[in-house]
Image: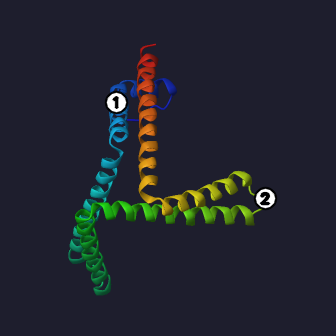
Amino acid sequence: MAVRTDPADVLDRVGRHWGWVLAFGIVTVLVGILVLAWPGRTLIVVAVLFGIQLIVMGIFRFASAFGSDLTAGTRTLYALLGVFSLIVGLYALRHVLITVLALALLLGIFWIISGSVELFNALSNRDMDGRGWAIASGILGILAGIVVLVYPAPSLLVLALVLSIWLIVFGIMAIVNAFRIRRLRAA
């Protein structure tokens, strides 16, 4: 059966599921409100989820080392990576505040490196489109990374607050779009 791709057919198919878009928007707004109400707890949840993800990845890496058709060297590396991931994940769960600070430091280092690369690329490529914006973005990334490294805890709280506002706005936009989709389908 061929799928029709004319706009009316696509709108009809999407319009039948406008409720899912509405539900997504409502959940997104609620998560944004929760993050806004408890930014510190949100950071703790992120750290715990990070630890859990490392533990799960460690278990899968370790299991795949023995359940796959791999060379002995690759099998050993997967097993070591699995054990290391498991240990780091357990440590992250045991020392959640250290995990939050470590994530802040990694974010700061990433922003400095990313900003430096972008700045270097813009400065070395004189014919680049949007060169001024790339230079500004690189400098902003470097400065943001430095701020996060100097003030990790307050920086993360500000980032959590910005995230909460973004989630609320994004959720409201999804809710508005859900009603637009429903209205367009009815027309």
Q: Nearer the viewer, residue 89 or 82?
A: 89
- Secondary structure at badge 1 equals helix
Q: Residue furthest bottom?
A: 72
Q: Residue at x 67, y 62 (%)?
A: 119
For residue 26, which numbered disc appears in the image? 1
| Count of numbered badges drawn on the protein | 2
Drawn side of residue 167 relative to residue 142, left or right? left
Residue wearing tag 2: 127
Q: Quadrant of residue 93?
A: bottom left
Q: Is residue 144 left or right of residue 81?
A: right
Question: Residue 147: x percent and y percent?
Answer: 53, 58
Q: Earlier in the sequence, mark 1 or mark 2?
A: 1
Does dot 2 land on a helix, a strand or a loop?
loop
Q: Badge 2: how crowded within 10 Å, few (<14), some, or many (20+)? A: few
In the image: residue 157, left or right of residue 111: left
Tell me: 147 left or right of 30.
right
Q: Residue at x 64, y 61 (%)?
A: 118
Please say if 82 is above or below 158: below
Rounded to the nearest angstrom, the CA distance separating label 1 from label 2 is 45 Å
**Residue at 31% of width from left, 60% of height from top?**
97
Residue that appears at 42% across and 34% down: 168
